[in-house]
Amino acid sequence: MAVELNVSVMHSTPNRPLSKSERALNRWMLEHGNTEKSPFLHQLELAEVSPWHCSCGCATINFQIKGSPEALPGVHILGDYLFGDGASTSGIFIFESGGFLSGIEVYGLGGDAPSILPTPQELRTFENGQ
């Protein structure tokens, strides 16, 4: 069975610090996520955004933790949320791999994945419904 991979674009630019709004969003997602959040809140202070960009143009970002090796491939979700409504309902989750905070994934449920990140105030859990 063939598997289609999502092609990404790498740039030769270095990692960059998280913006104030990115840091606030990620902190909120960790604080309201599952019970495994404690070690990852500390890592968030050391997180940088890698130069990787998804080829679809979505707002997904990957992290590199200063002083740590690159996270191994894989996804273990630490918090999963919804935002938007109707045809524009989307999802976002924060994840780790191999013990390292790895990034946030943004995806569309009724259409394309959003190209901008939501604010913490826009997020709701799946339990609170679409």
Image: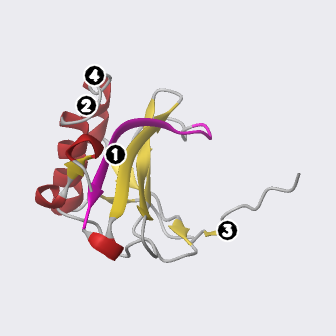
Which SS type dominates the magenta stretch? Answer: strand
Whether the residues at callouts 4 and 1 have beta carbons within 8 Å, the answer is: no
| Secondary structure of residue under mark 4 | loop
Q: Please give the residue where the numbered disc 4 appears in the rendered image.
A: 35
Q: Residues within 10 Å of mark 3 (few under 14, many from 20)?
A: few
CA distance for labels 4 and 2 = 14 Å
Q: Position of residue 106 (x, y in %)?
A: 41, 61
Give the label on residue 42, or none.
2
Between marks 4 and 1 in the image, the one whose residue lies nearer the viewer: 4
CA distance for labels 4 and 1 = 20 Å
The answer to which image quadrant residue 118 occupies is bottom left
CA distance for labels 3 and 1 = 24 Å
Between marks 4 and 2 in the image, the one whose residue lies nearer the viewer: 4
Q: Residues within 10 Å of mark 1 (few under 14, many from 20)?
A: many
| Secondary structure of residue under mark 2 | helix
Q: Earlier in the sequence, mark 1 or mark 2?
A: 2
Q: Please give the residue where the numbered disc 3 appears in the rendered image.
A: 7
Q: Is residue 120 visible?
A: yes
Q: Please give the residue where the numbered disc 1 appears in the rendered image.
A: 47
Q: Position of residue 88 (x, y in %)?
A: 32, 74
| Secondary structure of residue under mark 1 | strand
Which residue is painted at 48% across and 77% down in the image?
57
Q: With respect to residue 17, does 76 lie above or below?
A: above
Q: With respect to residue 119, does 12 lie above or below?
A: below
